[in-house]
Image (tube, grey):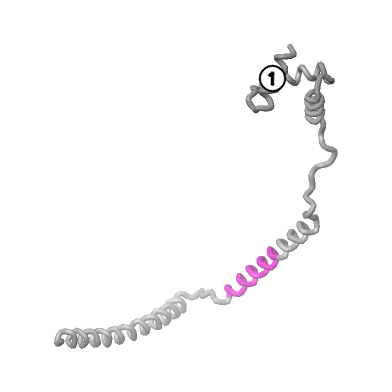
Amino acid sequence: MESRIKELQEKYWAGESSLAEEAELKAFFKKNPSMAPEGRYWNAVLKKQKETPDTAFKHPNTSSWRSKWSVAAAITVGLIAAILVIQDARNQSQFTVEDPKEAYEITRKALMMVSSGLNEGKTYSKEIANINKAQEKVTEDK
């Protein structure tokens, strides 16, 4: 029996033992705790497995005031956003047009303004086309 335990110990410390062999070692040293220093090791392992910590781990750099401030900041941002949305909704009501003729006239004026800008672009594009033609003639003459 002693040689079997020595063999199991050597396999265990070499990292080659199976779970069944480790269980056999644990059982042996549980029955014979004072056999060797390894027996004290196994007793300590078994004792630690049964223990539960008294308190939960708390990271030393965390504090509760930080989380309270972040919650307060989130609430403040939410309230400000809600106020801005409500004010925007009130301001948009003054731009609504109920009369279809008035809406047509406003749309026509806006489209005419865009159209005049596009027409200006056409005149510039004609000038650019003339410049390109002149440049082509100059390069052909060379």
Using the image, determine if residue 63 lies above or below residue 88: above
On whether residue 137 falls in the magenta region, the answer is no
Q: Is residue 105 rendered to the left or right of residue 81?
A: left
Q: Is residue 60 rendered to the left or right of residue 134?
A: right
Using the image, determine if residue 62 lies above or below residue 92: above
Q: Position of residue 6 (x, y in %)?
A: 72, 18
Q: How packed is label 1: few (under 14 Cα within 10 Å), some, or many (20 or more)?
A: some
Q: Quadrant of the N terminus?
A: top right
**Nearer to me, 63 or 8:** 8
User: Who's the residue at 71% across and 14% down the image?
Assistant: 3
User: Who's the residue at 80% across and 22% down the image?
Assistant: 36
Residue under numbered circle 1:
8
Q: Which residues are magenta?
A: 77-93
Q: Is residue 64 rendered to the left or right of residue 112?
A: right
Q: Position of residue 75 (x, y in %)?
A: 72, 61
Q: Position of residue 38 (x, y in %)?
A: 78, 25
Secondary structure at badge 1 equals helix
**Nearer to me, 94 or 19:** 19
